[in-house]
Image (spheres, rainbow, N blue to C red):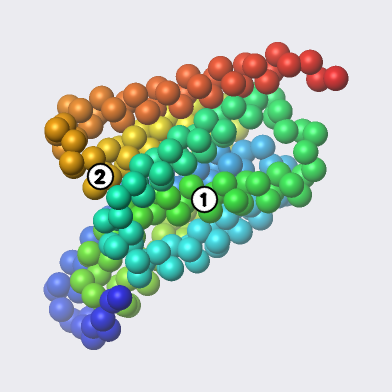
Amino acid sequence: MHSLVAVDFYSPLFWVAVGQIVIIDLLLSGDNAMVIALACRKLPDNQRKMGIFWGVGGAIFLRVVLTFFAVTLLALPYLKIIGGALLLWIGIKLLSEGKDGASKTIDASGNLAVAIKTIILADVVMSLDNVVAVAAAARGSLFLLFFGLALSIPLMIWSSQLFLRLIDRFPLIIYLGGGLLGWIALSMAITDPILYQLPVDFNSKALHILLSSFGAIFVIVTGLILSEKKTKQPSG
């Protein structure tokens, strides 16, 4: 739990913490925004904003809950491995839906619900490190902690709308986004506490880049293969 620390607006440390939180949110909100854009890209135009709104809203609510337990959760063995596996699955699922909207036969409201669930699940998995970083920068101040959470809302909404427009114009971004999820998945999994018991230096920068790159390539290639299979399946 976080103790209630008095807010001193005249303290240089307060404004240093504010600056750190802004930078953290700017750097880490892009990943979440990409997931939102990928999940909402096949929704009708009139449902995209609804998908973004409810997806971000649900994710922020769960992020608030996570804030109070994130440090403890990150120390649990296997949690990051499970989270990484979930992100791999989400990335492949988002890429394998087909180039031409293979889910046209699904009711639109069903699509909206699936998009919202995908956003919330991915955001919760990806937000653990974000929450810990913001909590560390807040230095026990609930005001700064919730300032960081509040700031992430407009950043994710604005960034996701930008990514959606870019995806409409440049579909290649879909695969770059899927690769990003694969990269994050493996880079998260190899920092799981249980792996520290193995005779391998997972803190090695070269190994980290190699395994993270493998995750990106794995998601892109698997997503492409499944997408092609769906495209070739007879519609009848």
Where is residue 89 shown, x and y percent of the image? 50, 35
Q: Amino acid at mark 2?
A: Ile
The Cα–Cα distance between marks 2 and 1, rounded to whole angstroms, is 23 Å
Assess disc 2: are there few (<14), some (14-19) or many (≥20) residues with their C-alpha within 10 Å of its C-alpha: some
* Left or right side of 188 for 46: right
The residue sitting at 28% across, 62% down in the picture is: 71
The residue furthest bottom is 6
Residue designated by label 2: 194
The residue sitting at 56% across, 17% down in the picture is: 225
Where is residue 217 shown, x and y percent of the image? 40, 22
The mark tally for this picture is 2
The answer to which image quadrant residue 212 occupies is top left
**On residue 38, which mark appears?**
none
Q: Quadrant of the N terminus?
A: bottom left
Q: Nearer the viewer, residue 98 or 166?
A: 98
Q: Nearer the viewer, residue 96 or 134?
A: 96
SS for dot 1: helix
Mark closest to the chain's N terminus, 2 or 1 = 1
Residue designated by label 1: 121
Residue 16 vertical position relative to residue 120 in the rendered view, above or below: below
Query: Cβ–Cβ below 8 Å for labels 2 and 1?
Result: no
Residue 216 vertical position relative to residue 195 in the rendered view, above or below: above
The residue sitting at 35% across, 66% down in the picture is: 69
SS for dot 2: helix
Assess disc 1: are there few (<14), some (14-19) or many (≥20) residues with their C-alpha within 10 Å of its C-alpha: some
Where is residue 100 shown, x and y percent of the image? 69, 25
Q: Nearer the viewer, residue 219 or 60?
A: 219
The answer to which image quadrant residue 50 occupies is bottom right
Residue 201 vertical position relative to residue 145 in the rendered view, above or below: above
Labels 2, 1: front one: 2
On the question of residue 130 being in view, the answer is no
